[in-house]
Image: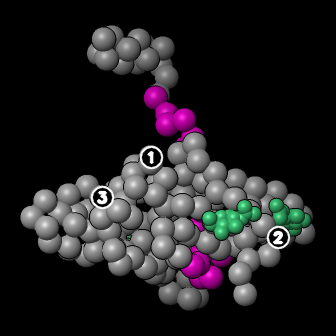
Amino acid sequence: MVATVALLVTSLGLIPQPIMASYGFANNCEVRGARLSESFLGMYCNNHNTAEYLYNWTWIDLNLCVSNYGGRLIPKKDGAFFRSCKPCSVKLNGSASDDHVTLNLGCNCKDVKGHTPATILDLNTLIGNDDGAMTCYDHRGNKTWIGPA
Ligand SMILES: *[C@@H]1O[C@H](CO)[C@@H](O)[C@H](O)[C@H]1NC(C)=O
Ligand SMILES: *[C@@H]1O[C@H](CO)[C@@H](O)[C@H](O)[C@H]1NC(C)=O
Ligand SMILES: *[C@@H]1O[C@H](CO)[C@@H](O)[C@H](O)[C@H]1NC(C)=O
């Protein structure tokens, strides 16, 4: 059945896409001001008012986006990583002057042996920005005008 569908898709020349192919938030969110509060990631992101370069503060629960796969952080819808990954932090990848700074999530995640190896995930591969709200898969974070002080 799966093979049939794949064949059909191939013969139509369509490439299967995830429901929401949104990622690359580091291009238009202020990853340098990112905060991680428990499993919630927050920062300022540009909204559609690009003419005036306006932005909103947005939070998204990374439990909706990330999973623990045998001690390794992986992108996964509703992955609920935080049950078995602690502590966690976010770190920039790139220098301050770099235009292509991205944001990594780093945690210690429980593996099958009960060890907690350090693991990192480039959040730019799975988090998008939709009009000032961070997104992953078909989930959309909330947004407010001003962020926490
Ligand atoms: C940092 O980014 C570079 C290129 O953008 C990538 O090759 C490298 O693997 C990243 N390092 C980490 C620790 O994510
Ligand atoms: C957005 O989500 C965060 C984290 O759950 C919460 O603290 C905040 O009150 C929410 N803001 C709005 C406007 O719903
Ligand atoms: C998002 O930010 C704009 C200004 O950049 C503001 O007018 C708007 O009210 C904000 N949206 C929310 C939900 O706070």
Q: Quadrant of the C terminus?
A: bottom right
User: How many circles with numbers are drawn on the protein?
Assistant: 3
Residue 5 seen in the current view: yes
Of 51 and 90, the residue lying toward us: 90
Residue type at mark 2? Trp
Mark 2: is the Cβ under 8 angstroms from ligand 3?
Answer: yes
> What secondary structure is the stretch in magenta mostly built from?
loop
Residue type at mark 1? Lys
- The answer to which of marks 2 and 3 sits earlier in the sequence is 3
Residue 92 image position (x, y, % from top left): 48, 80
Of 91 and 88, the residue lying toward us: 88
Of 30 and 143, the residue lying toward us: 143
Compared with residue 42, is residue 137 higher up or lower down, i.e. above or below?
A: above
Residue plotted at (30% across, 64% down) = 84
Using the rendered view, name the quadrant where residue 58 is placed.
bottom right
Among all residues in the image, which is located at the extreme right? Answer: 52
- Asked which secondary structure carries label 1, the reply is loop
Q: Which residue is mark 1?
A: 77
Q: Which residues are magenta?
A: 16-35
Residue plotted at (35% across, 78% down) = 87
For residue 68, the mark is: 3
- Asked which secondary structure carries label 2, the reply is loop
Residue 20 image position (x, y, % from top left): 57, 41
Compared with residue 30, is residue 114 higher up or lower down, i.e. above or below?
A: above
User: Horizontal placement of 58 versus 17: left or right?
Assistant: right
Q: Quadrant of the N terminus?
A: top left
Of 21 and 81, the residue lying toward us: 81
The answer to whether the residues at label 1 and label 3 have Cβ atoms under 8 Å apart is: no
